Amino acid sequence: MESFHVAGFLLVIFLFLVPLFHGAPAPRTERTEDGSEIWGYVEVRPKAHMFWWYYRSPYIAQDSNKPRPIILWLQGGPGASGVGIGNFEEIGPLDNYLKPRNSTWLKHADLLFVDNPVGTGYSFVEDTKLFVKTDDEAAADLTKLLIEVFNRNENLQKSSLYIIAESYGGRYAVTLGLSALKAIEAGKLQLKLGGIALGDSWISPEDFVFSWGPLLKDVSRIGSNGLKQSNILAKQIKQQIDAGKFVEATDSWNELENVIDASSNSVDFYNFLQDSGIDHMSLTASEKSRQIAMRRYSKYLNSFRPTADGDGDLDSLMNGAIKKKLKIPENVQWGRQSDLVFNAQEGDFMRPRINEVDELLEKGVNITIYNGQLDLICATKGTEAWVEKLRWDGMQTFLSMNRSPIFCNGENTTKGFIKSYKNLHFYWILGAGHFVPVDQPCVALNMVGHITQSTDASK
């Protein structure tokens, strides 16, 4: 969802956005001399190559009696690069300027980034027919990657894997969770699944589109006419989803975003307190349908870049120093977001994934849901709506419980709230938009410590 408003994109900047490579196979595995970083490609299907990058935490002491936590970070989109965005702009050890990040999640776990699905970031295909069309197909590829990476490394097998996702990545997380469990039970995958966390995740499109109009009306961002138009389109989307017309629902979703944009004077879909900052007068109608999404997404993340020497441009970094370090094949060009990967999944984009969350809960998997208060695209109001639809047997008790406040760094200021019952945990994070680790790094880091069972969630 991070680049998320890309329905209807055409074949724009084809080679730049979707790496295609013909020739010798990509290098399999590389590592630093001290073994603190390992990376490489896995051919998840013939001619479909997925890139991964593993960081070993320098903050965690080796304890043979306690599993070493590993976080697998899954970016959204579909088609946004976790190796680039999640790593350098959110939770990795270095920022866009290659300066140390004080709030890196390495303080609580090892980190594993992937460019998923194939065709995203450094991952590439040798034939565009190999793009995945569904979340389940993406999960199958990710499971193959885990088999190749974990089954070949006994040290990793002793660890606990926590799948933490953002935006559309939440759909990959729940489908991967089920696929990985099946492979573990069949003896094909050697790892321990510690839990799954869904950050501002696009689990139930229907509930999100119904939340947009009322939320924006309540905060005075749209008026009565905008609310009326939004509700009409939301009902249309629900009818299309109920009828299994998911491509049509994606088109209607795109239309609804345009209505919200016009009614709100271009509210930022990632933080409803901000404007998207798009100069509509400079765009033709055709350009709007292709470019607004990426401009919104890029502007929001760019606004949080640290002040430092140099321009901190992620595209330049990933296609320059990082590409050279990682020995990426020369013909592979990194892109922040692949519109072609998104378009390949337009038939699955509006399909709900609530049942998968239910199934994971019933299997006893620890599920954490966290949401930024100021997010619109995956609004907390919509997240609460789909959570209330869960049929898990602990749901009624969970809903009846009170929330506990969250603080950070010893301050008395309320930073959020948490509610937990058995294996379901929900964080309401105040002052954060769609990108919680960027907006509230201290709270996010403490939350990760709780997820990986190394700190108290309320501190």
Image (cartoon, rainbow, N blue to C red):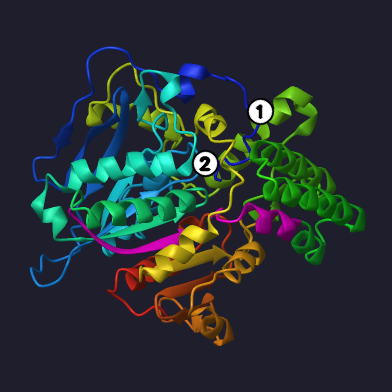
* Distance CA(mark 1)–CA(mark 2): 14 Å
Residue marked by disc 1: 290
User: SS at mark 1?
Assistant: helix
Say whether disc 1 or disc 2 marks the residue closer to the N-terminus: 2
Residue 151 locus on image (x, y percent): 15, 47
Q: Quick check: is 207 in the magenta stretch? A: yes
Instruction: Determine the residue positioned at 45% across, 74% down.
Output: 425
| 43 in relation to 418, above or below | above
Amino acid at the residue labelled 1:
Arg
* Label 1 crowd (10 A; few <14 / some 14-19 / many >=20): some
Residue 128 locus on image (x, y percent): 44, 20
Instruction: Determine the residue positioned at 10% across, 65% down.
Output: 62
Circle number at residue 77: 2
Q: Quadrant of residue 30?
A: top left
Q: Quadrant of residue 383?
A: bottom right
| 18 in relation to 236, above or below | above
Q: Is residue 359 left or right of residue 109?
A: right
Amino acid at the residue labelled 2:
Gly
Residue 248 locus on image (x, y percent): 71, 37
Circle number at residue 339: none
Please give the range of residues in magenta.
190-212
Q: Is residue 275 left or right of residue 136?
A: right
Q: Quick check: is 235 in the magenta stretch? A: no
Instruction: Determine the residue positioned at 78% across, 62% down.
Output: 214
User: SS at mark 2?
Assistant: loop
Let me know if residue 287 appears in the view: yes
Residue 141 locus on image (x, y percent): 34, 39
* Label 2 crowd (10 A; few <14 / some 14-19 / many >=20): many
